[in-house]
C-alpha cells in the first residue's frame, strides 16, 4: 500500500489563491453544499476547518466557522471566524425573501423541520410535480 503525503502537503496541493477577492479556492472535491472536503486519516473533513486548524490552531469547542467572504469553497483562515451555531444561523432568520424574491411565509416546514419556505415556491413545486404525474 502506498504511503500518503502529509496532510499539509496534500492540503496545499488543492488551494488556488484568487487575486481579486483574497479567497483561497479549494479545487478538489466539494460536497453538494459547496464545501471543500479532504481526507484526514480514515475520515473526511471539511477543508476550511482543516485550513483553520493547520494555520490558526484548534477551533474553540462549541463553535462553527463562518465564511465572511460567503464563498463556501474558500479555505483562507482570514476569511473564517469562529462563532456559535445560533449566531451563524441568525443571518438566515433575518432574510425576508426566498432566493427567487418571494416573501417567506413561515419558518416551520410541513414536516416539522426548521426551514425557510415561501408559499409561491411551494405552489410552483407542487404544480411541477402534478404536471409530471407525481401526485396523481
Image (spheres, rainbow, N blue to C red):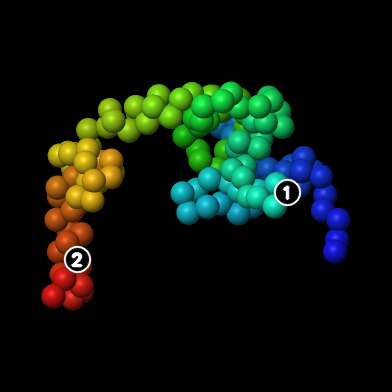
Judging from the image, what secondary structure is the residue with disc 2 in?
A: helix
Q: Earlier in the sequence, mark 1 or mark 2?
A: 1
The CA distance from mark 1 to mark 2 is 44 Å
Identified at 73% across, 49% down, the residue is 41
135 relative to 9 in the view: left or right: left
- Residue 46 falls in image quadrant: top right
Numbered circle sitting on residue 128: 2
How packed is label 1: few (under 14 Cα within 10 Å), some, or many (20 or more)? few
Q: Where is residue 31 in the image (x, y as percent from the top left)?
A: 52, 52
Q: Position of residue 96 (x, y in %)?
A: 22, 33
Identified at 13% across, 75% down, the residue is 136
- 79 or 85, which lies in front? 85
- 105 or 111, which lies in front? 111
Q: Where is residue 135 in the image (x, y as percent from the top left)?
A: 16, 71
Vertical comparison of 11 with 122: above or below: above
Q: Position of residue 54 (x, y in %)?
A: 72, 32
Numbered circle sitting on residue 41: 1
* Quadrant of the frame with the N terminus: bottom right
Identified at 18% across, 76% down, the residue is 133
120 relative to 33 in the view: left or right: left
Amino acid at each position: 500500500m502506498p504511503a500518503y503525503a502529509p496532510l499539509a502537503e496534500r492540503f496545499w496541493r488543492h488551494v488556488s489563491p484568487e487575486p481579486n477577492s483574497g479567497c483561497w479556492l479549494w479545487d478538489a472535491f466539494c460536497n453538494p453544499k459547496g464545501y471543500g472536503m479532504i481526507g484526514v486519516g480514515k475520515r473526511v473533513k471539511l477543508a476550511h476547518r482543516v485550513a483553520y486548524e493547520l494555520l490558526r490552531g484548534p477551533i474553540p469547542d462549541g463553535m462553527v466557522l463562518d465564511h465572511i467572504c460567503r464563498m463556501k469553497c474558500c479555505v483562507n483562515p482570514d476569511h473564517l471566524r469562529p462563532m456559535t451555531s445560533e449566531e451563524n444561523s441568525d443571518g438566515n432568520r433575518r432574510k425576508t425573501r426566498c432566493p427567487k424574491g418571494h416573501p417567506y411565509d413561515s419558518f416551520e416546514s410541513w414536516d416539522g423541520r426548521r426551514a425557510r419556505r415561501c408559499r409561491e415556491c411551494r405552489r410552483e413545486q407542487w404544480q411541477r410535480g402534478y404536471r409530471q404525474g407525481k401526485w396523481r
